Image (tube, rainbow, N blue to C red):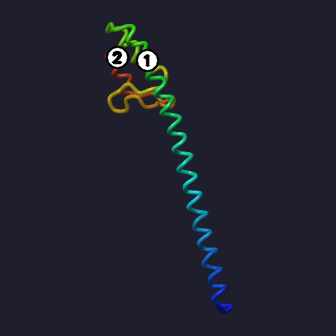
Amino acid sequence: MDREQLFDHISKLEADLRNMQENLETLKVHAVNLVEENVSLQMEKEHYETLVNNAEEKTDASFKHNTLKNLYDEGFHICNVHFGTHRHGEECLFCQGFLNQ
């Protein structure tokens, strides 16, 4: 292998390493997003399980309304558009309209 081929080979390896580093960074970002989503889903699941256990103890209609109001007050959507997702502190006209019915 002559000198020019050697330098071409080294340059190609450097480019491959840079490409692998970029792919690794992208993979790390996706992994962080998945972990955050998983934590959020686990929290929602725990809230849901708590509410289901409480709902089984009381079954009258006013309790159902109060449960939905409690869900809304805890920061979750109760409207059919975004049911069960976090509101992140924002008010939702659909949920408020549903509660006022």
Place of residue 75 in the rendered image (x, y in percent of width and height, measured from the top left): 48, 25
Residue linked to disc 2: 100
Name the quarter where the N terminus is drawn.
bottom right
Callout 1: SS = helix
> Residue placed at 38% from the left, 27% from the top?
93
The reply to whether discs 1 and 2 touch (Cβ–Cβ < 8 Å) is: no
**Residue lying furthest right in this view?**
3
Q: Relative to 97, does residue 8 appear above or below in the rendering?
A: below
Could you say which disc has been placed on residue 80 in the image?
Answer: none
> Residue placed at 53% from the left, 45% from the top?
33
Name the amino acid, label 1.
Leu
Q: Relative to 15, does residue 24 appear above or below in the rendering?
A: above
Name the amino acid, label 2.
Asn
Q: Nearer the viewer, residue 74 or 13?
A: 13
Place of residue 60 in the rendered image (x, y in percent of width and height, measured from the top left): 33, 7
Callout 2: SS = helix
Nearer to us: label 1 or label 2:
1
Tell me the CA gap for discs 1 and 2. Answer: 21 Å
Mark 2 residue crowding within 10 angstroms, few (<14) / some (14–19) / many (20+): few
Mark 1 residue crowding within 10 angstroms, few (<14) / some (14–19) / many (20+): some
